[in-house]
Image: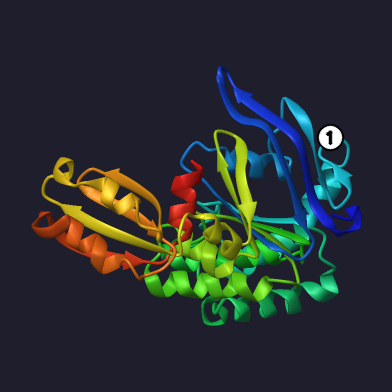
Amino acid sequence: MNSDDVMVKIGSLTKSFGHIKALDNMNLDIKKGELLGIIGPNGAGKTTAIRIICCILQPNSGEVMVGGYSIYNDQIKIKSMIGYLPEEPNLYERFKARNLLKYFGELYGVPKNQLDGRIDELLELVGMSERAEDRINTFSKGLRQRIGIARALIHDPELIIFDEPTMGLDPATSRTVRNFIKELKGDKTVILCTHYMDEADLLCDRVAILNQGRIRDIGTPKTLKEQVHGDIILKVKVHQPQKIDTNRITALNSVEALNLEGNQFLISLNTREDISTIIDVFGSQAYSVNTKEPTLDDVFIQSV
């Protein structure tokens, strides 16, 4: 990848908290204009990595470059380039929505002759124009998230970071927030940390799977899903798994992998032609049969 095309370059990044290693020699390049998803279990190091990129935390070792600037030498410049929406936006509750955006706009040095217009534009973007004069403490979690997005965008940053932006939101508000994020694709570089695999699949150009402080896999959602064994996954729940002759199943040409989770068999297939034969093997032991296409959930489980 040409260095001119890279917005964030992370090299050999390590961070420990006491004896706990949150990041372990993490390496990652993020292209300009791409929407990169970072997924991983709790404690994988996602938030630690984000805080280091934002110059909130210092690593033990390694380097992070944002737009060609180093987190060690150019923190003020980097902070001016980033808009960050944490999982719980720290909004000043006594402020009115418009005044909050004006306060942060002034902090970031938005020219005074442009600030009011910028605020109006963002309030309209997040659907909050009619609540501009209402105090933050009157807003629901979903409305606060919208104002949090507007605050993150107030200084027109080159890089925008969302940490679990739809966590705890109702489906309608989640859809609205996702639409905001989708509109930023291409125009801005976006990092999205999420636990929702369908969200990453829907929005992201690439997805990085982070576990135990390291990138375990990275690629487009399509490419990652293609790496999962089989084009079809047959899920069969049985009464007594030990009574199933699995050799008869794995001998079939269409079967790429067979796994047992509790009383459920997961069978990866490259075609549907042997499904009826497989079901015959289970016979009366089977009480639930389903098929599905591979998802990012499958990729995630396989990677971690």
Can you give x and y, in whole percent of width and height, for residue 9 in the image?
Answer: 79, 46
Compared to 147, does 229 lie above or below?
above
283 or 288: nearer the viewer = 283
Q: Quadrant of residue 18?
A: top right
Can you give x and y, in whole percent of width and height, for residue 124 in the image?
Answer: 61, 81
Determine whether the residue tagged by mark 1 lies in a helix, strand or loop: loop
Q: Residue lying farthest top?
A: 19
**Which residue type does callout 1 highlight?**
Tyr
Q: Please report the residue visible at 64 percent of the width from the left and 76 percent of the height from the top.
A: 183
Q: Which image quarter is the N terminus in?
A: bottom right
Q: Residue 76, can we see it?
A: yes
Q: Residue 139, can we see it?
A: no
The residue indicated by pointer 1 is: 72
Q: Is residue 85 left or right of residue 300?
A: right
280 or 163: nearer the viewer = 280
Q: Please report the residue visible at 33 percent of the width from the left and 46 percent of the height from the top.
A: 259
